[in-house]
Amino acid sequence: ADLENGESVFLGNCAACHAGGNNSVVAEKTLRKAAIEQYLTGGYNAAAIKTQVTNGKGSMPAFGDKLGPDDIDDVAAYVLDQSTKW
Ligand code: HEM
């Protein structure tokens, strides 16, 4: 996966609600490792992140019609890579 492209996809599509790995809508559901482990359906892995990005959940919109599969792969890899760095 291309982490640089993942970062640009993140900044363009996710940072509105997830700037700095935070969550401006549901505060406890951050993009940090411990929160993903606790809250993300499917657990702490790229496939689970891709599923949520593709389909959305709760107040998070679906991106399956907006982003192509490569961009979804890359943004999931970026979120996973960042999850211990935010
Ligand atoms: C949750 C990624 C865009 C709102 C999450 C989670 C991930 C994620 C991995 C799970 C975090 C956790 O459970 O601790 C992304 C990515 C995005 C994106 C990669 C861009 C492609 C957005 C946008 C919004 C948003 C634009 C607001 C309009 C939320 C909300 C949750 C969430 C409300 C909690 C969902 C729930 O469990 O009820 N996001 N997100 N996200 N995100 Fe996003």
Image (cartoon, rainbow, N blue to C red):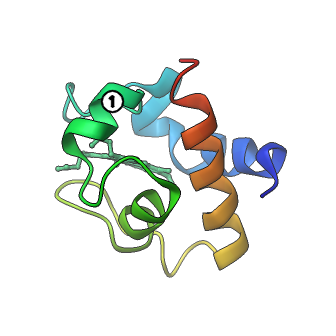
Outermost bottom residue: 65
- Is ligand 1 less than 8 Å from the beta carbon at label 1? yes
Q: Position of residue 57 (x, y in %)?
A: 23, 62
Q: Residue at x 64, y 40 (%)?
A: 11
The N terminus - image quarter: bottom right
Q: Amino acid at mark 1?
A: Thr
Q: Nearer the viewer, residue 29 or 40?
A: 40
Task: Say if 5 sits above or below 34 in the image.
Answer: below
Left or right of 55, for residue 8:
right
| Label 1 Cα neighbours within 10 Å, binned few <14 / some 14-19 / many ≥20 | many
Q: Nearer the viewer, residue 61 or 75?
A: 75
Q: Nearer the viewer, residue 42 or 68?
A: 42
Left or right of 63, for residue 27:
left
Q: Which residue is mark 1?
A: 30
- Secondary element type, mark 1: loop
Q: Position of residue 4 (x, y in %)?
A: 83, 43
Q: Residue at x 71, y 41 (%)?
A: 7
Q: Residue at x 48, y 77 (%)?
A: 64
